[in-house]
């Protein structure tokens, strides 16, 4: 049975994972040449017929499976592997990247509200040195740039949000410039009421079916008048903005206010940053 091997340097032979001689030789050469001081970007200049992309080469140099374990035969000895890790650490320090550029899954401030206006993907927060930076999650796919939308620092988003709140305090009528919700929900309510009326006029109607329709109508009415409705959120946002306006202290980023009124933030390549409020109104700021 053929099995796919994704780790360069190995192959399956009669169902058993074994070292691939030619590939393992190249793996050893990659580690040795890099340890001699040649950066990843120049390895192809020193190793003949090397056709592995730069991102994968960097990953290979940190892959502990080459040390050997219960599944993978050893290709790289411990001493060389640790020397390469130290070399990578020194390299990051030399170019000002002592901390790796990693996606922060839990600690970012703005939650999952950030969206890409160019490709529609979500934005992810990364820590780059001491900075928190947001990039389109589809910016790089398998080492290739697939979305060229701009990145934005978290502090910039916070500053733009403060500007948005200031504009809403000066022009509260903008809160009511709603572009979504409303009409679709009203049509759904009317449809449910029409079904209820028809069922009631039918002398042989099923009581369970009628109850389901009544519950459905109640749910739709709740959406338009309660937690999910535009009217509800419009009033809530107006009250919160007024309370914020009356606060005497200097206006800074208010995380509680942000969570309470912002549904999404959409980033565009031309510098537009659109804050969509929870009632559907949209406020545009520019980087």
Image (cartoon, rainbow, N blue to C red):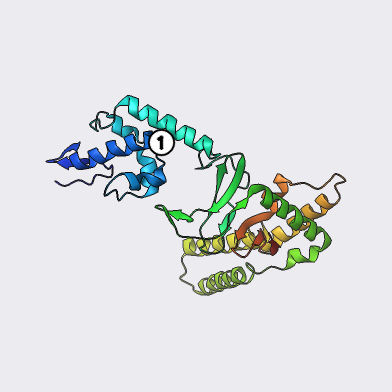
Q: Quadrant of residue 180?
A: bottom right
How many marks can you see?
Answer: 1
In the visual, does 160 lie left or right of 139?
right
The x, y position of residue 96, in whole percent, is 56, 39
> Up-down: is 132 above or below 217?
above
Front residue (pair 182, 56): 56
Outermost left residue: 14
Outermost top residue: 79
Q: Quadrant of residue 116?
A: bottom right
Secondary structure of residue under mark 1: loop
> Up-down: is 72 above or below 132?
above
Front residue (pair 141, 76): 76
Front residue (pair 235, 176): 176
Residue holding disc 1: 37
Looking at the rendered image, the quarter that the C terminus falls into is: bottom right
> Up-down: is 219 above or below 99?
below
In the visual, does 131 lie left or right of 50?
right
The x, y position of residue 266, in whole percent, is 61, 60
The x, y position of residue 2, in whole percent, is 16, 47
Residue at the (85%, 47%) spot, across then down: 247
* Disc 1 residue crowd, few under 14, some 14–19, many 20+, Cα 10 Å: few
One can see residue 227 in this view: no
The x, y position of residue 107, in whole percent, is 58, 39
Front residue (pair 56, 126): 56
One can see residue 164 in this view: yes
In the visual, does 60 lie left or right of 271?
left
Residue at the (77%, 52%) spot, across then down: 240
């Amino acid at each position: 049975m053929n099995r796919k091997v994704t780790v360069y340097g190995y192959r399956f032979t009669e169902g058993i994972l074994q070292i691939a001689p030619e590939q393992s030789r190249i793996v050893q050469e990659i580690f040795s040449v890099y340890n001699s001081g040649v950066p990843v970007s120049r390895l192809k200049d020193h190793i003949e017929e090397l056709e592995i992309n730069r991102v994968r080469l960097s990953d290979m140099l940190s892959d502990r499976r080459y040390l050997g374990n219960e599944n993978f035969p050893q290709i790289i000895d411990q001493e060389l592997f640790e020397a390469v890790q130290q070399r990578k650490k020194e390299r990051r320090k030399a170019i000002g990247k002592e901390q790796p550029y990693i996606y922060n899954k839990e600690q970012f401030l703005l939650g999952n509200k950030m969206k890409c206006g160019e490709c529609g993907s979500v934005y992810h927060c990364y820590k780059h040195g001491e900075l928190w930076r947001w990039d389109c999650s589809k910016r790089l796919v398998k080492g290739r740039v697939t979305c060229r939308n701009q990145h934005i620092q978290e502090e910039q988003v916070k500053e733009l949000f403060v500007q948005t709140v200031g504009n809403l305090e000066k022009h509260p009528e903008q809160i009511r410039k709603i572009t979504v919700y409303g009409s679709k929900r009203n049509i759904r309510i009317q449809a449910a009421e029409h079904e209820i009326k028809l069922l009631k006029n039918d002398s042989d109607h099923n009581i369970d079916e009628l109850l389901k329709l009544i519950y459905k109508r109640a749910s739709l009415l709740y959406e338009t008048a309660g937690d999910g409705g535009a009217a509800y959120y419009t009033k809530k946002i107006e009250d919160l903005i007024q309370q914020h306006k009356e606060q005497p202290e200097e206006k800074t980023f208010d995380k509680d206010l942000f969570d309470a009124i912002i549904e999404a933030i959409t980033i565009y390549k031309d510098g537009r940053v659109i804050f969509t409020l929870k009632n559907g109104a949209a406020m545009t700021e520019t980087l």
